[in-house]
Image (cartoon, helix red, strand yellow):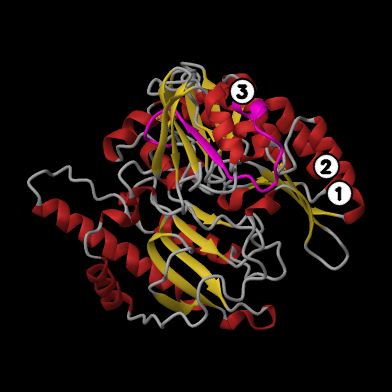
Amino acid sequence: MKHESSLASAADANAAIRPSACPGLVRVVAARDGGICRLRLPGGVLRAPHARALAEAARAHASGVLELTNRANVQIRGVRAGEEAALSAALIAAGLGPDGIGAANSPAQACIADELRNVMQSPLAGLDPLAFDTTPLAAALIDMLRSEPRFAALSPKFALLLDGGERLAERAHPHDIWLAARGHDAAHADETRFALGLAGCPCDAPLGTLAARDIRATVRALLHAFLDIADNLVDNQADKHANVERMRDVPNREALLERARARAGFTLTPDEHGIDAKRSTSADAGSRLGAHALHANGSGYVGAQPALGRLDASTLHALAALAQAHGDGTLRVTPWQGLLLPNVPAQAMPGVLDALAALGLIHTRANPLARLVACAGSPGCAKSRADTKADAQRLAALLPRDEAAAQVHLSGCERSCAAAHRAPFTLLARAPQRYDLYAACTPASRDDDASGFGRLVATHLTIEAAAPLLARRPRSTTDV
Ligand code: SF4
């Protein structure tokens, strides 16, 4: 009880020192359908016992509805008023918090320990024999983020990306600092170099490359330089609440690099390989679904996704059992709001696919729901102008099965919570059951056009009117 009462004050204490609307393990944020509690999962890894504990906690203290997020995390929706602290305590007791959170001296420290672990990796990190294993590096970066008191000043949204060159990776999400392996050769892993970039993604041109062994010190220097500049900018502005939370807010990144170099003495060399060079594939996001071999004996992983990223506690229990029976007892949450069962033998793959289908999960790209994403919508969010999830279900029923069709994003407002980068097509709600349709040519940052969604194609569409537009030329965003 003492631990629960301590956690009960966590959200208030934390908000005072780290204002944020981001849900966390301790910071349960109110929504229209109840509280939201978000668990950050380093590497997206969820062990079967943890999955069961999560399912039980969602049933005991919330609506039993869980969501997989586009940052490969899990969140519990519908947390009942007054049960926030009990939920957080149950999850921490089950081992779902970061190491040492139980020993945090204050609720605010518990929040910080939870929030300073935004290091995104491929769902195949450490599994793909053709890629650089970023797992130890990710652990070292998280440890560094949490061990230096100054880094507590970083926004809960501040995020790093490590791309090891895996066959499956989300490379279009923008991150504050991104690093992508270049020219990896498994026989000479020590010589692998990484491209480095700021406020973007590995689809962008990098600033240069550095050796894997220099990454930790370089990232540390960049973080200090960022905080130096953020502090100076805020101090020099009349408005002391000036918003310098993310790398994209820094006006002069060359100055930041110079400051970081002065601190760590690193040098970046020009990228010899170019984007996508020496990757075993171009990291096809379509391989997030279905059965895929990673090894010569045919063993590999099976991927699937619940419709629109939502699943219930019973389904999570069943997935944990499936992972224990046929995989290695773990699940990996993917940034496409789905999950993988790693280390499945070849002969078990057909049965696992059947079991996933029986649970109602999508495991083929041809299913229209595989290419639809939608935010919480009006039942869950007061800002939403439409019930985006229900409308997405209706849209799915009207779209053809097509493996090559482009992604469609339904957003209840301009904040675009469900898509971290611009989707090929966006339906932006104007009113209940009415949408404006946008088309984008590239998955570039949402900041580089006026709307953030691309070119406005049509307005005030019903779902029935939007469906034929999207079905007619599903591969092209320029001919709609
Ligand atoms: S995109 Fe807007 S409407 Fe949808 S969940 Fe986010 S804030 Fe709410």
Along the horizontal axis of the image, is 129 left or right of 45? right
Q: Is residue 1 visible?
A: no
Residue 396: say if magenta.
yes
**Can the viewer see residue 365 in this picture?**
yes
Mark 2 to mark 1: distance in Å?
6 Å
Q: Which mark is residue 349?
A: 1
Q: Dots 2 and 1: beta carbons under 8 Å?
A: yes
Badge 1 amino acid: Met
Q: Which mark is residue 42?
A: none
Q: Residue at x 65, y 42 (%)?
A: 338
Main secondary structure type of the part rendered in magenta: loop
From the image, tell me which residue sits under label 3: 394
Q: CA distance from mark 3 to mark 1?
A: 31 Å
Query: Mark 2 = which residue?
Result: 353
Name the one closer to the observer, 288 or 266.
Answer: 288
Residue at 63% from the left image edge and 36% from the top image edge: 94
Q: Is residue 465 magenta?
A: no
- The stretch of residues the image draws in magenta is 395-416
The residue located at (41%, 71%) in the rendering is 206
**Quick check: which quadrant has ligand 1?**
top left
At label 3, which amino acid type do we have? Arg
Q: Is mark 3 within 8 Å of ligand 1?
A: no
Residue 224 is situated, as x and y percent measured from the top left of the image, at 30, 64
The nearer-to-camera label among 3 and 1 is: 3
